[in-house]
Image (cartoon, helix red, strand yellow):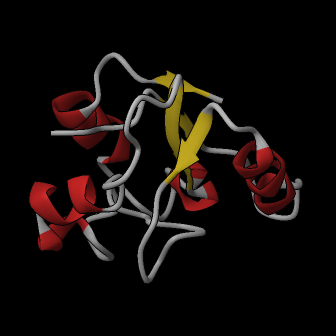
Amino acid sequence: MTLPTFVVIGAMKAGTVSLGHYLDEHPDVFLARGGTRSEPNFFIAEDNWPRGRGWYESLFDGAGRAAAIGECSPCYMWAHVYRGVPERMAQVILEARLV
């Protein structure tokens, strides 16, 4: 079971995708892999939450011994649109740091 140690929540048009690219270049950082790699949006009920925790964990397959494991999803900040994101994050990745 591999889960992220950090989540870049960012903001729309604030360089979140660029930050993700820079982090991905670091040899000790592993970012989520998969079809929705750049923005997994797992904790959004209307998006990928129904896919389940197994799907989310699969995005981090191959992380190995990376010092930092993470994902970037700027939509997590849209609390006025997507309700319950912080609560779902607390259920799954309580110890993860938010960037």
* Closest to the observer, 72 or 9: 72
| Quarter of the C terminus within the rendering | top right
| Quarter of the N terminus within the rendering | top left
* Closest to the observer, 22 or 72: 22
**Residue for point 16% across, 32% down:** 91
**Residue for point 31% across, 55% down:** 61
- Please say if 99 is above or below 80: above
- Please say if 50 is above or below 59: below
* Number of marks in the rendered image: 0
Q: Residue furthest bottom?
A: 35
Q: Give the x, y percent position of residue 51.
A: 15, 73
Would residue 16 appear left or right of 4 to someone viewing this image?
right
Q: Residue furthest top?
A: 95
- Please say if 95 is above or below 93: above
Would residue 18 appear left or right of 64 to someone viewing this image?
right
Q: Give the x, y percent position of residue 71.
A: 52, 49
**Residue for point 41% across, 23% down:** 96
Q: Give the x, y percent position of residue 6.
A: 51, 30
The image quarter in which residue 49 lies: bottom left
Q: Give the x, y percent position of residue 27.
A: 69, 38
**Residue for point 29% across, 47% down:** 84
- Please say if 56 is above or below 89: below
* Closest to the observer, 86 or 4: 4
